[in-house]
Image (spheres, coloured by chain):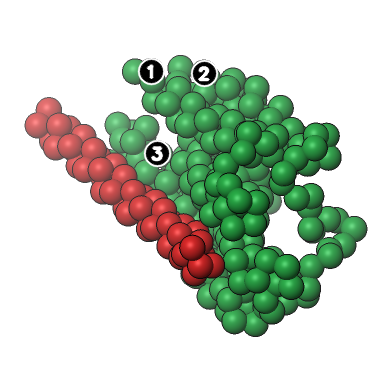
């Protein structure tokens, strides 16, 4: 398979248009299954009661916030190194969805923290580093759109995205490096301490978020391609 | 506050945020297509 074939905006525009509806459909199905597992099948937590069910949104949103930033930074790196147009467009398309998941993680974390810790917010390493991630996404979007020449915006924003990658290990390891209010990971590569139904619900919601993020990114990148390439012959002939 | 309040605030606001993004995607697509139309009109005038 020739992957460079898909790096052309005109080819990728059509490819993304065909794939996006499938990802949205998968996201809807997985969300329905995940909500059923999380809200109906999963048992009540012995210590936290029903309020722990925030986990089915909070953890997948937090995972996606970090994962999307990593993918965005990879595209930013490709754009800076090889000066590829589509990479910069993909980075721009990922940023708003990443910011949305980061906001969701912070918001749901606050509404989980209040009944369990007694506070909506604390200047805790995990929470502050996640807030910094939100600011990085907002900064990326602002910087990318701050220049009249979009290619200059791409370069400036890509640089910020690459510098911001240093925040990802800080978020992930913050609960190990510092004494924090935030609990450690319940799910590790080596296994999980959660009840199987809770774990299944959370993983289903994580896959749903993943599918949604791909669908939203593919849909947005089509708009970015049209905005950038509207003077080209292939766009006018659409 | 009961646990329902915290759950509704989490799930409700998350649903609203996703809905806002989907509407935003549709609006951006419409705006991009309008831009293409304007380019076509300009070309037709030339």
Seen in the image, is A50 located left or right of residue A153?
right
Quick check: do tags 2 and 3 share a chain? yes
B3 versus A217 height, above or below: below
Secondary element under disc 2, as helix, strand or loop, is helix
Can the viewer see residue B8 in this picture?
A: yes
Residue A207 seen anywhere in this rendered image of the structure: no
Q: In this figure, which residue is indicated by the disc labeled 2?
A: A156
Q: Which mark is residue A224?
A: 3
Chain letter for the red part? B
Q: Residues within 10 Å of mark 3 (few under 14, many from 20)?
A: many
Nearest to the eye among marks 2 and 3: give it: 2
Q: On screen, A93 above or below A85? A: below
In the image, are marks 1 and 3 on the same chain? yes
Subunit under mark 1: A
Residue A31 at what x, y percent from top left? 54, 70
Same chain assignment for discs 1 and 2: yes
Taking the spot 50% from the left edge, 41% from the top edge, the residue there is: A99
Q: Are marks 1 and 2 in contact (CB under 8 Å)?
A: yes
Q: Which numbered marker is on residue A92?
A: none
Q: Earlier in the sequence, mark 1 or mark 2?
A: 1
- Is A38 situated left or right of B29 in this image? right
Q: Residue at x 64, y 65 (%)?
A: A52
> Mark 1 — residue?
A147
Of the numbered discs 2 and 3, the one sitting upstream in the chain is: 2
Element at badge 3? helix
């Amino acid at each position: 398979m020739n992957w460079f074939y898909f790096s052309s905006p005109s080819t990728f525009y059509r490819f993304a248009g065909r794939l996006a509806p499938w990802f949205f459909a998968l996201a809807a199905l997985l969300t329905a299954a995940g909500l059923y597992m999380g809200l109906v099948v999963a048992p009540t937590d012995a210590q936290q009661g029903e309020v722990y069910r925030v986990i089915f949104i909070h953890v997948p949103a937090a995972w996606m916030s970090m994962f999307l930033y990593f993918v965005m930074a990879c595209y930013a790196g490709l754009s800076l190194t090889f000066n590829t147009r589509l990479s910069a467009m993909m980075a721009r398309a990922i940023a708003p969805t990443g910011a949305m998941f980061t906001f969701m993680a912070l918001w749901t974390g606050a509404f989980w923290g209040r009944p369990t810790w007694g506070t909506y917010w604390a200047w805790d390493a995990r929470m502050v580093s996640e807030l910094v991630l939100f600011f990085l996404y907002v900064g990326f979007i602002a910087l990318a759109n701050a220049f009249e020449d979009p290619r200059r915006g791409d370069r400036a924003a890509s640089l910020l995205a690459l510098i911001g990658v240093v925040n990802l290990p800080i978020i992930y390891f913050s609960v190990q490096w510092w004494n924090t209010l935030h609990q450690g990971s319940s799910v590790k590569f080596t296994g999980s301490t959660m009840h199987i139904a809770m774990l299944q619900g959370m993983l289903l919601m994580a896959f749903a978020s993943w599918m949604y993020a791909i669908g939203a990114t593919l849909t947005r990148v089509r708009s970015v391609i049209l905005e950038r390439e509207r003077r080209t012959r292939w766009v006018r002939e659409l | 506050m009961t646990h329902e309040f915290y759950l509704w605030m989490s799930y409700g606001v998350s649903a609203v945020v996703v809905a806002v993004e989907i509407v935003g995607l549709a609006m951006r697509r419409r705006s991009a297509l309008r831009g293409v139309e304007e380019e076509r009109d300009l070309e037709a005038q030339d």
